[in-house]
Image: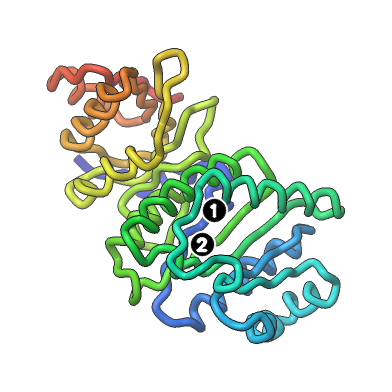
């Protein structure tokens, strides 16, 4: 079976509002952050730069870009050190962190900005297994907030320090990521009131990552069903459907997978998977 290209599938709604960026050189992160924040300034947003190091040095990094420099002078740009904000070894509180960004977004709107945009190097918050687990849960939770509110973020991770496997666990909770970072995306930018959205490919490469992402996303049923907008799904194998059926059984729910693919419905029928229903997306 041929897999559709990303162009054929079409991007998820507002897919660029929450981006995971893996980097290997510090200068690479800074350049991407400058561009991301400058886009926010052009849209009238308040922007926040969060990274490790001295705040004066971080401010200097942004001043290298004239657009960000103007924002610093006008007060539209804020800078904070991740080292100052979080203690070493901190395990993030997912719900509490979302609340903090929700408050910051409200403050930006009250000050006359169109929203809040954040570029953050959060490598230091994903160094231990406990940190990675909590931060992956946070990434999914905050994506649901961003889907409904004027906040956007670029979350950056040092691939050289954390490794590709760890970055994949975090990248798959974003609607968009660096090329090759993750084979799929399970995120909150769904359509038609769906519980979540699913893009990309669920294949052999996803074998260990997909069940882990499902568990961390904590998808909860409404009236007994968990509806997933899978219009951006390009491929799904039987192992991934078994994982979906297992999740449905453990949470006493029916998972409704809305996709443009015809294969999943045939597989679900052939394998007689309870708790999974496939519907053809419009």
Residue at label 1?
Answer: 18
Q: Residues within 10 Å of mark 2 (few under 14, many from 20)?
A: many
Q: Residues within 10 Å of mark 1 (few under 14, many from 20)?
A: many
Residue 220 % position (x, y): 42, 27
Give the colour scheme of this rendering: rainbow
Residue 114 % position (x, y): 78, 51
Q: Secondary structure at mark 2?
A: strand
Residue at label 2?
Answer: 155
Q: Is residue 139 left or right of residue 37?
A: left
Q: Please tell me whether residue 270 is drawn above or below residue 116 in the rendered image.
A: above
Q: Dots 1 and 2: beta carbons under 8 Å?
A: yes
Outermost residue, top side: 223
Please give the name of the residue rendered at 34% of the width and 63% of the height, measured from the top-left corner.
128
Give the mark nearer the N terminus: 1 vs 2: 1
Q: Secondary structure at mark 1?
A: strand
Q: Quadrant of residue 45?
A: bottom right
Q: Please tell me whether residue 219 is drawn above or below residue 274 in the rendered image.
A: below
């Amino acid at each position: 079976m041929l897999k559709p290209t990303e162009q054929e599938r079409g991007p998820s709604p507002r897919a660029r509002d929450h981006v995971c960026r893996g980097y290997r050189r510090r200068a690479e992160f800074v350049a991407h952050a400058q561009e991301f924040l400058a886009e926010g300034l052009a849209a009238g947003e308040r922007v926040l730069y969060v990274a490790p190091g001295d705040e004066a040095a971080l401010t200097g990094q942004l001043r290298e870009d004239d657009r960000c420099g103007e924002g610093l002078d006008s007060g539209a740009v804020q800078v904070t050190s991740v080292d100052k904000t979080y203690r070493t070894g901190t395990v993030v509180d997912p719900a509490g962190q979302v609340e903090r960004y929700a408050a910051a977004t409200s403050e930006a709107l009250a000050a006359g900005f169109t929203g809040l945009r954040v570029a953050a190097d959060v490598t230091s918050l994903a160094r231990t297994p406990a940190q990675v687990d909590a931060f992956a849960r946070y990434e999914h939770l905050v994506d649901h907030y961003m889907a409904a509110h004027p906040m956007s973020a670029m979350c950056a991770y040092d691939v050289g320090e954390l490794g590709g496997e760890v970055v994949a666990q975090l990248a798959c909770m974003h609607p968009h990521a660096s090329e090759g970072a993750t084979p799929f995306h399970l995120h909150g930018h769904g359509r038609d009131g769906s519980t979540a959205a699913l893009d990309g490919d669920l294949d052999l490469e996803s074998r260990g990552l997909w069940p882990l992402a499902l568990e961390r996303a904590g998808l909860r049923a409404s009236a007994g069903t968990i509806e997933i907008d899978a219009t951006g799904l390009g491929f799904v194998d039987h192992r991934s459907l078994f994982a979906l059926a297992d999740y449905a059984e453990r949470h006493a729910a029916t998972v409704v997978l809305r996709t443009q693919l015809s294969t999943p419905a045939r597989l679900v029928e052939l394998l007689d998977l309870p708790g999974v229903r496939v519907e053809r997306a419009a």
